[in-house]
Amino acid sequence: MASNPVVEIDLQGKLTKLASGKVRDLFTIDDRTLLFVASDRISAYDVIMKNGIPEKGALLTAMSVYWFQYLQTQIPTLQTHFLDSSLPPSLESSLPTSQVDSLRSRSMQVRRLRIFPLESIVRGYITGSAWSEYKKSGTVNGIPLPAGLIEGQKLATPLWTPSTKAEVGDKDENISVAKARELVGEEYAREIERRSLQIYWVAAKRAEEVGIILADTKFEFGVDPEKEGEVVLVDEVLTPDSSRFWPKETWEVNLGKQQPSFDKQYLRDWLTEQGLKGKENVVIPEDVVRKTASKYQEAYEKITREKWNSART
Ligand code: ATP
Ligand code: MG
């Protein structure tokens, strides 16, 4: 029996489920508002594992909320989908207390928006799929880079490297900036790029203050149909699920090889070693679950400078 088996988030029909991603479920509160619920599910190489990581949903929600609030103070003109970390009163009063606490810790109320079909990735350092492409062709998302870069090196300037947002079961594909402009329109693509680079810059600076390198990260944006023209930051933000966080103090000695990181790299490495990369129905062993959970917790504590308190889950 897998530890912490993945369980469905069940609102007992109190709210209608709008969509279910690999990790998050969205429920309709009203025409303009959604409940955005992060489960404990974990995906790697686009496949969901059979068991989850205890407290991951609550931890990533708390981290996203931290960042939404921080970004708002640093970039007052930035629009985000975040509204509130409480539950709608009707849910509070109609679900059993034990369920309410667990649900509240993993939920945010957000603005319901039309989501652009783009993953807006910003890379400050060369690693992962960007490193693989560079090794083959000297480019990243088709952009030629200087010769002689080494794995993990800081890029001269952060790069915007959009990808498609694949349907469940498919893989996201890197696309050129020109293709991104075709997909969402020139104006929106330019605005998404501008905002992404701006947020990356602010967040990387904040992370650096606590000894973390934000190597790369992924954002999503939406638009309110009643306020066309204004892009809104959505989804989760700057968490270990959407970002690579590296400890700054060991970065230099690890140049040219894989960096230790506060995210799911540990799980990815285990899957690769076991020949399970991309396989369905994988049960993660207890020690890998525990190690992954502690990486996520470390990321939370370093970034927010607050101790993680499990009592809130
Ligand atoms: P992954 O991020 O691992 O690729 P996924 O994209 O399959 O997973 P999740 O992240 O689990 O999906 O679920 C979040 C889903 O909710 C995404 O499809 C995202 O586009 C969508 N979403 C996020 N914020 C909003 C919003 N404010 N309104 C409508 N949909 C949203
Ligand atoms: Mg997502």
Image (cartoon, rainbow, N blue to C red):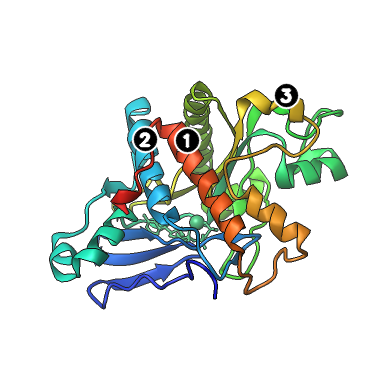
Against 142, is 167 above or below? below
Please provide percent x and percent y for residue 47: 61, 66
Q: Which residue is mark 1?
A: 195
Q: Name which residue type carries label 2.
A: Leu
The residue beneath circle 3 is 252
Q: Residues within 10 Å of mark 1 (few under 14, many from 20)?
A: many
Q: Residue at x 44, y 36 (%)?
A: 301
Mark 3 Cα-neighbour bin, 10 Å: few <14, some 14–19, many ≥20: few
Residue 157: image location, x then y, percent: 65, 25
> Where residue 61 is drawn, which disc sits there?
none
In this rendering, the label closer to the viewer, 1 or 3: 3
- What's the amino acid at mark 1? Arg
Mark 1: secondary structure: helix
State which tag comes first along the sequence, 3 or 2. Answer: 2
Q: Nearer the viewer, residue 80 or 151?
A: 151
Instruction: Give whichever of discs 1 and 3 has the lower sequence position.
Output: 1
Q: Are marks 1 and 2 in contact (CB under 8 Å)?
A: yes
Q: Residue at x 48, y 62 (%)?
A: 23
Q: Gap in Å between the C-alphas at discs 1 and 3?
A: 29 Å
Secondary structure of the residue carrying tag 2 is loop
The tag earlier along the polypeptide, 1 or 2, is: 2
Q: How many marks?
A: 3
Report how far apart the C-alphas of labels 1 and 2 lie in the structure: 8 Å
